[in-house]
């Protein structure tokens, strides 16, 4: 039986995340967004609160909370700004949970423990200039030479690219299989900043998430020890899809927080702003937009909570997580658009945060699988064209 009543621990950690975002970030997020600057001190503060090791077992340096707690924290962070949630999506969702599930014991001790403690930051390198939703289109290559793999390629639109210490990089180890679009030729590698031939750069002038770090990764004859192969050769695509399931979950939870922020700001403004002798909230068309936000918030929250519950049970949840991500991100863009409309001319300036919400919301319809990809996924499940096969590794159930 699914039970969505929250434990005292879940509520306590939710409050920790809320207080952190409200007190530490909210007062200066407009300045950070205007300056397109990522404040690295945020990472240290999040580490001190245990947020960077939220779902990682204590034996690997984390605080070991369940996946619903992770969702609640992501909701609270994105309520203030998407850039905060992105940190957890990438560091925990895409990287650390992937290391926890697919890494061997030596890799967990070397990389996962410092990441869970916040001493190192992890990210995920799959997307390339010519490969987004079509992951098999990546062109990065890994050639085995003795005790090393030599990596060459370019990664693009990588969150925390210029901040991270450790990277999970995907590359072809069997180029002949690429010609056949056979994803079993892709492998995953743990790459460290400081390895010769690895360079990163920040992307500026983005539409949204301007207070977050997004960049590119260049790999030129990077020597990666064979011990840094994650999983087995040829398992890279499976590992990537597993990681994306976790990332999508955090995106869904975060988008839910953005909807709530749009709702709260719109309700406040609609009660204060008067036209034709009464608050605009009394007008039916304004009520219609606020109604849509309220319903979208509740639906989005239920969808991500269901996916989180399934993760806690160790049940594969690709369909449910995809649905939560698709719906919440569509709803967030809709809520942000309506919030700008409710604020009128003021919504068109950064005097109010709704214009930032609008810019930030658009990205979520693109990353972690575009909305078009999720429509196809959901239709394929409904038509019986897609049936999940057991993975060699599945997200370990929560045993707290």
Image: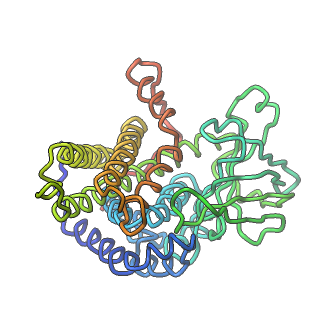
Q: Report whether 27 appears left or right of 194.
A: left
Badge count: 0
On the image, the x and y values in percent for residue 195 come to 78, 68
Quarter of the picture containing the N terminus is top left
> Image quarter for residue 288?
top left
| In front of the other: 48 or 347 | 347
Quarter of the picture containing the C terminus is bottom left
Q: Residue at x 73, y 36 (%)?
A: 185
> Image quarter for residue 263?
bottom left
On the image, the x and y values in percent for residue 85 come to 43, 62
Is residue 170 shown above or below 183? below
Is residue 343 shown above or below 333? below
| In front of the other: 246 or 233 | 246
Q: Residue at x 35, y 54 (%)?
A: 340
Q: Residue at x 65, y 44 (%)?
A: 236
| In front of the other: 103 or 250 | 250
Q: Residue at x 69, y 40 (%)?
A: 234
Q: Report whether 384 appears left or right of 104.
A: left
Which colour assignment does the render follow?
Answer: rainbow
On the image, the x and y values in percent for residue 118 come to 51, 75
On the image, the x and y values in percent for residue 363 come to 50, 50
């Amino acid at each position: 039986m699914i039970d969505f009543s929250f434990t005292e621990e879940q509520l306590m950690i939710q409050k920790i995340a809320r207080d952190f975002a409200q007190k530490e970030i909210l007062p200066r997020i407009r300045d950070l967004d205007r300056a397109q600057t990522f404040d690295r001190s945020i990472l240290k503060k999040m580490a001190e609160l245990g947020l960077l090791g939220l779902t990682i077992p204590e034996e690997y340096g984390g605080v070991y909370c369940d996946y619903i707690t992770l969702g609640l924290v992501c909701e609270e962070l994105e309520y203030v700004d998407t850039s905060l949630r992105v940190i957890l999506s990438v560091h925990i969702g895409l990287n650390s949970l992937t290391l926890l599930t697919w890494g061997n014991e030596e890799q967990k001790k070397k990389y996962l423990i410092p990441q869970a403690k916040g001493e190192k930051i992890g990210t995920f390198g799959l997307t390339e200039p010519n490969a987004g939703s079509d992951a098999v289109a990546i062109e990065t290559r890994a050639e085995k030479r003795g005790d090393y793999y030599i990596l060459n390629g370019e990664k693009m639109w990588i969150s925390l690219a210029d901040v991270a210490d450790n990277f999970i990089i995907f590359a072809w180890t069997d180029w002949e299989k690429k010609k056949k679009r056979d994803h079993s030729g892709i492998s995953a590698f743990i790459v460290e900043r400081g390895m010769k031939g690895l360079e990163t750069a920040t992307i500026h002038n983005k539409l949204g998430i301007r207070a977050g770090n997004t960049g590119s990764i260049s790999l030129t004859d990077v020597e990666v020890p064979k011990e840094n192969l994650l999983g087995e050769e040829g398992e890279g695509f499976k590992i990537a899809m597993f990681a994306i399931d976790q990332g999508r979950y955090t995106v869904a939870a975060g988008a839910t927080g953005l909807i709530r922020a749009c709702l709260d700001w719109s309700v406040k403004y609609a009660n204060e702003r008067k036209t034709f002798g009464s608050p605009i909230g009394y007008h039916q068309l304004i009520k219609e937009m606020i109604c849509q936000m309220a319903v979208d918030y509740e639906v989005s929250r239920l969808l991500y909570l269901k996916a989180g519950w399934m993760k806690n049970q160790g049940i594969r949840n690709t369909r449910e997580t995809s649905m939560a991500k698709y719906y919440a991100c569509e709803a967030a863009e809709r809520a942000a658009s309506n919030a700008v409309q409710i604020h009128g001319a003021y919504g068109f300036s950064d005097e109010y945060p709704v214009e930032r919400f609008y810019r930030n919301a658009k990205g979520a319809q693109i990353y972690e699988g575009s909305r078009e990809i999720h429509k196809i996924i959901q239709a394929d499940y409904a038509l019986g064209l897609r049936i999940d096969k057991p993975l060699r590794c599945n997200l370990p159930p929560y045993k707290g």
